[in-house]
Amino acid sequence: MTHMNTIKNPGVAEVFENYPKQIRKKLMFLRQLVLETALETKDVGTVEETLKWGEPSYVTKGGSTVRIDWKDASPHQYAMYFNCQTRLVDTFKELYRDKLKFEGNRAIVFDEEDEIPIDTLKHCISLSLTYHNRKHLPMLGV
């Protein structure tokens, strides 16, 4: 398991280094939430930290990939991305449309000044990290 503050994958470390400082801090916080949630969630197992589409990505054996990133085009926003071929974001919208902002069926979007609803986001991360074990259940078993 990756120590929370140490990024072992040099490609991932480089991507984090290239984010603007204030955004890097926000994305490191999201990274920490993903790693903490993986440790706290039953049956998750090992998390691989890698790059997918040039973005820091977190992959588990029974789960769907969670990615985090920031784009030049929206300098005051950053996001957590989920596989758009899943029912994850649609489920998150049903559960948390009053607490989170979404981009289509693929992302939870944050403004730089947003207060992150930690328990809500951890629940979303947990559903993604265990997705393949629950995808057959209505509302992913929530």
Image (spheres, rainbow, N blue to C red):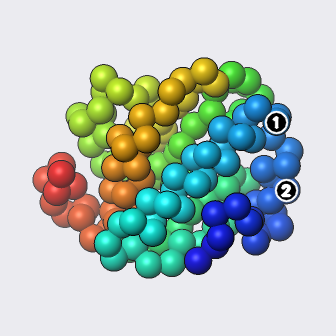
- What crowding class fits label 1: few (fewer than 14 Cα within 10 Å), some (14-19), or many (20 or more)? few
Q: Quadrant of the N terminus?
A: bottom right
Image location (x, y in percent) of residue 104: 43, 31
Image location (x, y in percent) of residue 129: 41, 63
- Left or right: 94 in relation to 14: left
Name the residue that disc number 1 marks.
Answer: 21
| Pick the front one: 115 or 91 | 115
In the rendered view, tell whether residue 52 sits above or below residue 139. Answer: below
| Pick the front one: 81 or 21 | 21
Q: Are marks 2 and 1 in contact (CB under 8 Å)?
A: no
| Pick the front one: 82 or 46 | 46
Is residue 37 something one can see in this rendering? yes
Q: Amino acid at mark 1?
A: Lys
Is residue 90 something one can see in this rendering? no
Name the residue that disc number 2 marks.
Answer: 14
Image location (x, y in percent) of residue 125: 42, 53
Element type at marker 2?
A: helix
Q: Residue at x 54, y 24 (%)?
A: 114
Q: Residue at x 40, y 29 (%)?
A: 100
Element type at marker 1?
A: helix
- Left or right: 118 in relation to 123: right
- Left or right: 66 in relation to 94: right
Q: Amino acid at mark 2?
A: Glu
In the rendered view, tell whether residue 45 sits above or below residue 16. Answer: below
